[in-house]
Image (spheres, rainbow, N blue to C red):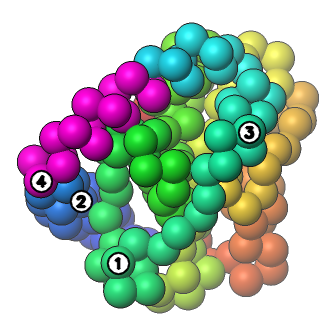
Amino acid sequence: MKWMRFFIYLRKYTWSPFFAKIEKATQPALFDEGIKALKEMKEKCTSVTDYLNFLVYRRFRYSNDPFKGALDYVSYPEITAAKKFGDCDDFAELALEVLKDHFEVAYRLYTFSGIFKGHVMVLLHNGHCWQLISNKTRLLWTNDGENIFERAAKAYCGEDLKYYFLEKIK
């Protein structure tokens, strides 16, 4: 469990900000385009269904980070919105940025099914049900809050789930 928190710390505070800042600095036009795209998404997407339909309609797609995911970093939501592709953590950040104001509670959920097999999802609560957003597990509705985090983690990893870690956003 300690190595997992250390991994999250490294990823969040060392690698990701460094590469995201390089991406932002080297592609200012793309970042400006992303600001406009993100503003449009926030205007049009007031629910999870709107958000998912927007991604499909605009042809957003999954893509590994460079070197087949070996160089893992999180892009700014503006960059993901402009590029229209990213990996699970990019889509999680985009979903949080677009939808967090429409929900009472928001969590980032990290799952691990092996030492280099991780996934990031977003769990949102609107007052009466939980909703899961992931680029692989599209939507999970439940009114029952019992074991919701473990059930959400197992929705992606299945029985291979080793650990999961939550980060409360809102």
Of the two numbered discs 3 and 2 on the same chain, state the one appearing first in sequence: 2
Image spot of residue 159 (x, y percent):
80, 79
Q: Amino acid at mark 2?
A: Ser
Residue at 77 percent of width and 34 percent of height: 53
Q: What's the distance in space between the residues labelled 2 and 4, CA to CA?
A: 15 Å
Bounds of the magenta span? 24-38
Sequence-first disc among 1 and 3: 3
Amino acid found under the numbered disc labelled 3: Tyr
- Left or right, 116 with reference to 124: left
Mark 2 or 4: in front is 4
Residue 148, disc: none
Q: What mark, if any, has residue 66 been given in the picture?
A: 1
The quarter of the picture where residue 5 lies is bottom left
Query: Number of callouts in the render?
Result: 4
Residue on which disc 2 sits: 16
Q: Amino acid at mark 1?
A: Pro
- Please, is residue 62 above or below residue 35 in the view? below
Q: Nearer the viewer, mark 1 or mark 4?
A: 4
Our reading of the magenta stretch's main secondary structure is: helix
Image location (x, y in percent) of residue 63: 53, 69
Residue receiving disc 3: 57
**Which element is circle 1 on?**
loop
Snapshot quadrant of residue 55:
top right
